[in-house]
Each structure stands twice: as structure tokens, then as C-alpha cells.
Amino acid sequence: MMEDIELSAGERRRLDDTLGADERLLLAVKPRSVVEDERSTVERIVGTFFLVICLGVTIGMAEENPMACILMLPAWIAGLLGFFLPNIRRKRRRLTLYAITDRRVLIWEPNRCMVLRLRSIPLRADMIQEVACLPAGYGNLVFDYAWDEWNGAREERVAKQVGFIDIPQVKRVQAVLESAIAEYERKYNNLRR
């Protein structure tokens, strides 16, 4: 019961290399691709604003005091981040892949350096901690919460959801996962007897 999504050759290879010899893929799903949301638009506007201001101030300061241009470095960085952050988020979504097998859940997500990391979570009856479904059918299947790095200057840790985040047809994916868990539990209980 494979999800009807387009997987690249690299994603198919990742799946094939990860699956065990007698492990069966039930579903593969990717997070929805967001073309441009409100947050991205605001970030691009603010980033462009910073870049234009920085350019004007830097040109004006360069004639009088070239060393003062160094003071503009934080504003340049803020402008560049605001302008390119939506592209980075879009690339992270493109690299993310979720899969359900008859034994486990697989999550490929890029870390902050865009290096893919695989999480393999064995199927168990109580693995679904939270299901969030939006009216459009998109949503999250949360399996766990992991503590992320310190969140900036506020010095507090942030709980990050671990699971299938922002996926289409979340109820259908949940049904496939619950069916896989029931089948796995049935097999496991028969082996213990």
C-alpha cells in the first residue's frame, strides 16, 4: 500500500538500502511543499529592506570611514538571513521523507547543516502521542518530543516534535500506521506463545 507520491531515485535508494531483507514498505510520504507562506513573504520583505538600507549606509560610510563599514556587518547578516531563510526551509522539506514499514517508522530529516539524519522508531501500541489535523487534511502525527538546542538568548530549551510533520492525508497515514501496529502486535504475540 504505497503512497502515490513521486520519489526521486535517491529517495528510492535510501528506502531500499534501509529496509531489511524481509521488511515490507507500507507507505512513504513527504511533507507538503509550501511554495510561499505569509512568514516567508515577511522574511523576504524585511530581508530586502535590511539589504537596501545596508547598501545605502555602507556606500555612504565607505567614502568617509571605511572601517565603520564593519559596524554594518550584523545588519548585512540579518538581511541575508531574512532573504534566504525561506529557501533553506523549502530545501529542508524537499529532503524530508517519512516511511512506515511492517516493523518500524522511518524518518529522514536534514539537520541544521542539511545533512540527512535517519530516525528509526520500532512500532509499538502507544507510539502515537498526538494527532493534529487541519481542515485541509494536512497535519502532524507526533510520536515523541525531543529537546532541541538552547533557543537563543532566552536560555530555555525547546521541545521539538518527532514524527510525521505537516503531511497530507494525515488521517489516512494514521490508519495505515495503526493497522501496521496491530499487525505487528499480533505477530509478536503469536511468536511469544
Image: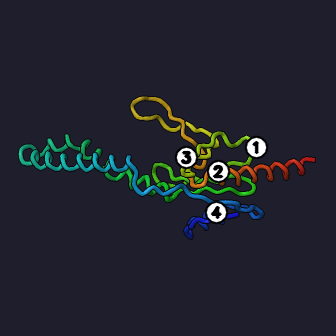
Provide the secondary structure element on which disc 4 rests.
loop
- Residue 87's tag is none
Q: CA distance from mark 1 to mark 3?
A: 24 Å
Residue 81 can be seen, yes or no = no
Q: What residue sits right under mark 4 in the picture? A: 3
Provide the secondary structure element on which disc 3 rests.
loop
- Please name which of the two marks, 4 or 1, marks the residue nearer to the observer: 4
Q: What residue sits right under mark 2 in the picture? A: 171
What's the amino acid at mark 3? Leu
Q: Residues within 10 Å of mark 1 (few under 14, many from 20)?
A: few
What's the amino acid at mark 1? Ala
Q: What residue sits right under mark 3 in the picture? A: 134
Q: What residue sits right under mark 1 in the picture? A: 125
Provide the secondary structure element on which disc 2 rests.
helix
Say whether residue 188 is left or right of residue 169. Answer: right
Q: Residue furthest bottom?
A: 9
127, 122: nearer the viewer: 127
Say whether residue 96 is left or right of residue 99. Answer: left
Q: CA distance from mark 3 to mark 4?
A: 20 Å
What's the amino acid at mark 2? Lys
Counting residues from the start of the chain, the first of labels 3 and 4 encountered is: 4
Counting residues from the start of the chain, the first of labels 1 and 3 encountered is: 1
Counting residues from the start of the chain, the first of labels 2 and 1 encountered is: 1
Q: CA distance from mark 2 to mark 3?
A: 10 Å
Q: Residues within 10 Å of mark 4 (few under 14, many from 20)?
A: some
Q: CA distance from mark 4 to mark 1?
A: 23 Å
Counting residues from the start of the chain, the first of labels 4 and 1 encountered is: 4
